[in-house]
Amino acid sequence: MLRYINSEKMGRGTHGWLDSHFHFSFAEYYNPDNIQFGVLHVVNDDMVEPGTGFDTHPRKDMEIISYVVEGELTHGDNMGNRQTLTRGQVQYMSAGSGVLHSEYNLGKGMLRFLQIWILPDKKGLQPRYGDYRFKLGDRVDKWLPIATGADNMVSQAPIRMHQDVNLFATIISEGDKAECKVGEGRQIYMVLVEGEADVNGIHMRIRDALEATEELLVIEAKQRAHVLLVEMEKA
């Protein structure tokens, strides 16, 4: 089963300093038929103006991945963490029993990053934070394991989450192909972060998405295609 999601039909939030594409219901965008995909609860594609950002606010009981596409993302929290990440780097926060955090663009250019929220397998867990400074080239024409469920010790992904989920990224050179097998009882949410590609005959452009269940995906890059996959148990 495949379902194509056109980015032009996604929810949208514009606030001057912030321009967001909402893959699922979030903030001012509410669609009762589009709350989440399995345990994947939020995918926000955020563009943040320089010198602005999300002021300190609370969060709890959520596994949060921030994937930096361009610019600089500066994180701060009440656990004492303060870090700045750039293109291709990833931040992880398990909000658990509760955390206060902020996310700013303190750079000179536009910040674009994907906020990914995943429902944890337990509530009230001890909060924790980590960041991973992947080299952009580590995902060119190959799948880069980014995150995995805490009990899945087979994966080489450095981020261990409190949920049966796997995150991968790749950048496919123009004219090349990549494959991904969605196994029995599993499903994938795919985001075309940058570029243009055909996936099983479906033409996708920047920010478009695809839901796939128990399928073999063949991704053919029409332009250099930057792809993010969130793989999980079938809902």
Image: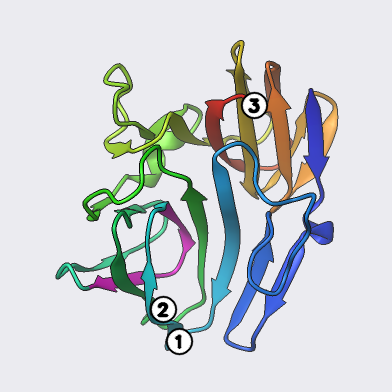
State which mark lies toward you, 3 or 1. Answer: 1
Q: Residues within 10 Å of mark 2 (few under 14, many from 20)?
A: many
Asked whether, in this view, residue 163 is left or right of residue 183, the answer is left
Q: Quadrant of residue 152?
A: top left
Look at the image and name its color scheme.
rainbow
Q: Is residue 223 magenta?
A: no
Q: Earlier in the sequence, mark 3 or mark 1?
A: 1
Q: Give the residue at mark 1.
A: 52
State which mark lies toward you, 3 or 2. Answer: 2
Residue in the foreground of this view, choosing between 48 and 41: 41
Q: Earlier in the sequence, mark 3 or mark 2?
A: 2
x then y, percent, for residue 227: 58, 40
Q: Which mark is residue 154?
A: none
Q: Earlier in the sequence, mark 2 or mark 1?
A: 1
CB atoms of marks 2 and 1 within 8 Å: yes
Element assignment for label 1: strand
Instruction: Give the residue displayed 21% in from the left and 51% down from the top.
Output: 126
Residue in the foreground of this view, choosing between 104 and 38: 38
Q: Give the residue at mark 3.
A: 176
Tell me where the magenta segment starts and ends, as one range: 64-77
x then y, percent, for residue 14: 69, 80
Asked if 83 appears above or below 35 in the picture, the reply is below
Element assignment for label 2: strand
